[in-house]
Amino acid sequence: MKKSLVLCVSIVMVMIFALSACGSANNSSNAQSKDQKVAKTLNITATDFKFNKQTYKVPANKNIKINFQSKQGTHGLGIDGTKVDIEGKGSTVVKLKPGTYHVHCTVPCGNGHGDMKAEIIAQ
Ligand SMILES: [Cu+2]
């Protein structure tokens, strides 16, 4: 009886160790590869029913880290011509060619949804 209990406890401990090791490895590799060469961090927040700025300017052809957060209600961040589509809250890294990119909300959030527009100018 005792042996099986010890075995059981050690299996649980190995599993906890494996899970935590796996989790931290993922986090650190993500942070490294994404944070390494970020030229600018763009913090975009959304409220009912607008983004915190009308125009965001970023350097072109460089890694831009975008942190998006809905501060009031639940909104999304979509950037036309890119794969960026963040719902609610999240971060991503993008590289933009020179140009103007339209920004819109990707979550049907209510009456003002269609008004939620901004632009990102990469230059
Ligand atoms: Cu919306």
Image (spheres, grey):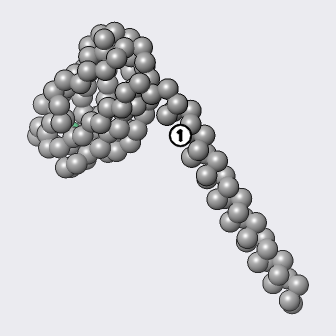
Position of 35 compared to 81: left or right?
right
* Quadrant of picture, ligand 1: top left
Asked if residue 49 is positioned above or below residue 81 in the image, the reply reads below
Q: In which quarter of the image is the N terminus?
A: bottom right
Instruction: Report the number of numbered marks.
Output: 1
Residue 52, image x, y percentages: 18, 36
Q: Residue at x 76, y 78 (%)?
A: 9
Going 82% across and 81% down the picture, which residue do you hit? Answer: 6
Q: Can residue 70 be seen in this view?
A: yes
Give the image location of residue 88, x and y in percent.
32, 45
- Element type where label 1 sits in the image: helix
Residue 45 falls in image quadrant: top left
Give the residue displayed 45% in from the left and 28% down from the top: 38
Horizontal side of residue 59 vs 72, given as left or right: right
Label 1 beta carbon less than 8 Å to ligand 1: no
Residue depicted at x 42% and y 14%: 61
Q: How crowded is mark 1: few (under 14 residues within 10 Å), some or many (20 or more)?
A: few
**Residue 41 x %, y %:** 36, 32
Position of residue 23 measured from the top left corner of the image (x, y, whole percent): 61, 53
Pointer 1 residue: 31
Quadrant in the picture for residue 105? top left
Task: Examine the rendering and report whether any part of residue 107 can be seen.
Answer: no
Classify residue 49 as left or right of residue 42.
left
**Residue 101, relative to residue 51: is it above or below?**
above
Residue type at mark 1 is Ala
Q: Quadrant of the C terminus?
A: top left
